[in-house]
Image (cartoon, grey):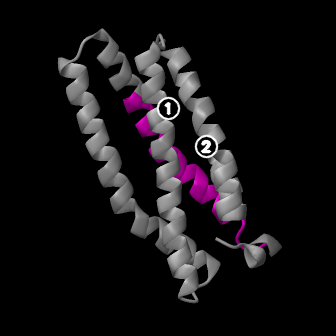
Amino acid sequence: VLLYMLIFYRLPGLVASLALLWYIAVVLAVFKLIPITLSLAGIGGFILSIGMAVDANILVFARMKEELRSQKSFTAALEQGFSRAWPSIRDGNGTTLLVAFILFQFGSSFVKGFAVALSIGIIVSMISALMVTRVLLRLLRGTILERIVKI
């Protein structure tokens, strides 16, 4: 996944990969703090939430690419990309959290483990995609890297 992001999105892919590594570290720390026993179902929920985190970054970068093609500055494309991607990210993650809640309420212990791991992963992935990635990309503003960035 990290290699795909690096090849396809170049520098923003590197930023997203760093945010994804931050995401994985935070989720594993939360799993350790709560503590959650990671069964096979819990690992499945964690892996699914990684996919959702990557999806959020891809949505943002696709919106940024559209803005850059319309001759907007990097800063304007960055802000528009995040604001235009937010409704899709919110809806996708919100419905997934709703389903995880239902699974937790009515499922067996294995299904509950999946739902808990997925819920934690989704919440942290929204923070990662909308805060960490945004901050890292904002740090590129005004640097030489901004001029050579290709999305």
Q: Main secondary structure of the magenta part?
A: helix
From the top left corner, tell me how far across and down residue 100 is, in percent: 28, 30
In this view of the protein, can residue 74 be seen by the observer?
Answer: yes
Where in the figure is residue 102, as x and y percent of width and height?
A: 20, 28
Element assignment for label 1:
helix
Discs 1/2, front: 1
The magenta stretch is: 118-143
94 or 132: which is nearer to us?
Answer: 94
Name the disc covering residue 47, or none: 1
Question: Is residue 52 depicted above or below 38 in this figure?
Answer: below
Name the side, left or right, on which 130 lies relative to 132: left
- Amino acid carrying mark 1 in the image: Ile
Q: Viewer-proximal residue, 69 or 3?
A: 3
Say what amino acid the circle numbered 2 marks: Leu
- In the image, what residue occupies the spot 48% across and 14% down? 38
Residue 130 appears in the figure: no
